[in-house]
Amino acid sequence: MGSAARAGGGRGAALLLALALPLGALVTGSPAQGEEAKKEDSDRPLQTVAADALPTVQIDGVVWDQEVVGTTVYAVGQFTSARPAGAAPGESETPRTNALAYDITTGEMLDWSPQVDAQILEVEASPDGSTIYLAGEFTQVGGEATARVGAVDASSGERKELGLGANSVVEAMDVSPDGSTLYLGGAFTELNGKDRARAAAVDLASGSVTDFAPKIADFSVRSIAVAPDNSAVTLGGSFTSVDGQATPGLALMGVDGTLRELGLADVVSSGGQFSGAMNLSGDDRGFYAVFYSGEGNFEGMLRADWQGGQIDLMADCHGDSYDVQPAGDIVYVASHAHDCSMIGGFPETNEPRQHWHAPAFSATARGTVQPSPEPHYASHTGQPAASVQQFFPEFAPGTHTGMTQATWTVEASRDYLVYGGEFTSVNGKPQQGLVRFARRHVAPNQEGPTDPGEPGIKASVTDSGEVELRIPYRRDRDDATLTYALYRDDTEGKTLEDYQAKTAVWNSKQRRAYWETGEVVARDTVEPGSTHTYVVVVWDQWGAWTRSETITLTAGEAPEDDDADQQDDDAEDDAGKGAGAARGADGAQPPEGAPEGQQPAVDPQGDAPEGAQRQPAEAQR
């Protein structure tokens, strides 16, 4: 997982202050949108998962981390009960003490239910999937003494003897690719009675603490990532130095604990009481890190190589980031980003400020980072910039941690993406703490273009029979390209296929980012004095669609000036504001017989890799 805000004291309290104080990267006011990122590659949109929020088991607290093993998702955090999708709080609840498992293909809860007496901050699986490792603040698992790091059976949830104990919270874990070594990080200073300054490693065959012993000077290690070829280990957190060398927030080392030079240290500095690397993930391309900043100089996501820590990808966005999940040619993040204009993405908006809790980025650089439009933020001009992709599910922040956050963790399998946190709804529908999304060939693809509401379509007609309709852009959470079509007189239809069988008097394919506003202008020519009805239909490539209300217009017969003005006003009144989306619009219902989605002619791009790329857990205490 990737976060830092777990109920209680310690470093979670520090994060709470970091989010509240006007320091470093925190901003007030209304900065203008920065210059669009320079394009050095195609800006072709990539295929993300669909934005349809799939029914998933719910919890009554917060999920800090998840681990995907085959079709099973193990979710951990701080909660006492779970309930099915669609059930309101207090209904159909089943006891679950800080851990549960569910089927990633159905969202239904499984019987797995280890008994853990305090919150769990991190979950990892052994490479063979038979053992689930837990870390956090607990002192008992299955009724037996277990000091902050333990193991349970992946099938039964029964406690397994691990023989480890830490003298303070364990917040980070990763298992070596061969399954031989368990790496641990946190705020502890002893592991099994041996001095270990906030980071350690254990030989799983013998149960002995290894010689891996970097000296982390202060604060804590929040996350650990081991290279897929077992050549390097990256530590992330709020620490400021390792082995006496300044390494604020990130450290790269060999598997023996020997510190290596970190190339990105000249660009990003994010350690200390109010800043840090929230989480790490890794793949063959490098390690990914996400940050929060109250006194550092970066919020957002970056990727650097395992050899020297040189940045080859940056999503420079304002707004703390909590977890990161690479999945093919897309990188998904859990965050509360509110300004990605430095990389050509959504700009800052205010009154109210808009936060995006699940932004998606290209996994390759598509431009260069531009200067921050807000002087309170550091600029990272010229760094290789990821591009923002069209994936904009909306989450309602929860109240469990008192931090007004939504998503804290993100994981993936080949076909599914799962978010966890403390959110209470997704896309306007109640869904607490856990949610699934799916690739296009699995998803229902019902999230389609939506009506933006007032002021609605504006219509005008001249006395010579020239008709003009100004149509506000429709927004689609997961498709940038939409088709707009205008139908005259033959305006009745129950399905999209009904309309596509008709002849449109005008149509246009438009590619617009989700945050863009503006108009599409449709024109038609009719006989003066004639009266006609019009309807605007908009659809995406998957068959999700919306239509406007019927608009009635009469072409004038060269009226007096005052009459012409009144006729234009009447036409605008008749235009109305448009109907709700046929599918997937906020609360809108499809017309009778609306299609249930269409499969693409070719397989969509952006396949997620088999299995999950693990993120170490972090949270607020």
Image: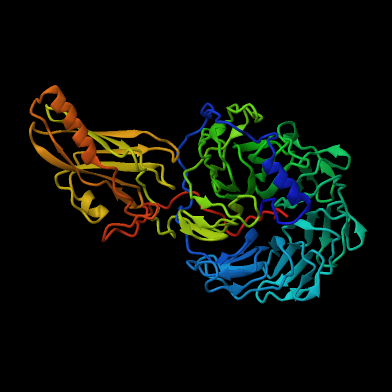
Front in this rendered view, residue 478 or 15: 15
- List x then y, in percent, for residue 328: 55, 49
Task: State whether residue 197 is above or below residue 164.
Answer: above
Q: Quadrant of the N terminus?
A: bottom right
On screen, residue 144 versus residue 538, left or right, reads right
- Residue at image location 80% in from the left, 39% down from the top: 247
On screen, residue 246 versus residue 387, left or right, reads right
- List x then y, in percent, for residue 90: 55, 70
For residue 357, say whether it is visible.
yes
Q: Quadrant of the C terminus?
A: bottom right
On screen, residue 531 versus residue 212, left or right, reads left
- Residue at image location 64% in from the left, 36% down from the top: 312
- List x then y, in percent, for residue 469: 24, 35
Q: Quadrant of residue 142?
A: bottom right
Q: How is the image coloured?
A: rainbow
- Residue at image location 42% in from the left, 53% down from the top: 603
Task: State whether residue 109 is above or below residue 386.
Answer: below
Q: How many marks?
A: 0
- List x then y, in percent, for residue 449: 36, 47
Front in this rendered view, residue 407 or 351: 351
For residue 461, say whether it is visible.
no
Front in this rendered view, residue 100 or 570: 570
Task: State whether residue 483 is above or below residue 88.
Answer: above
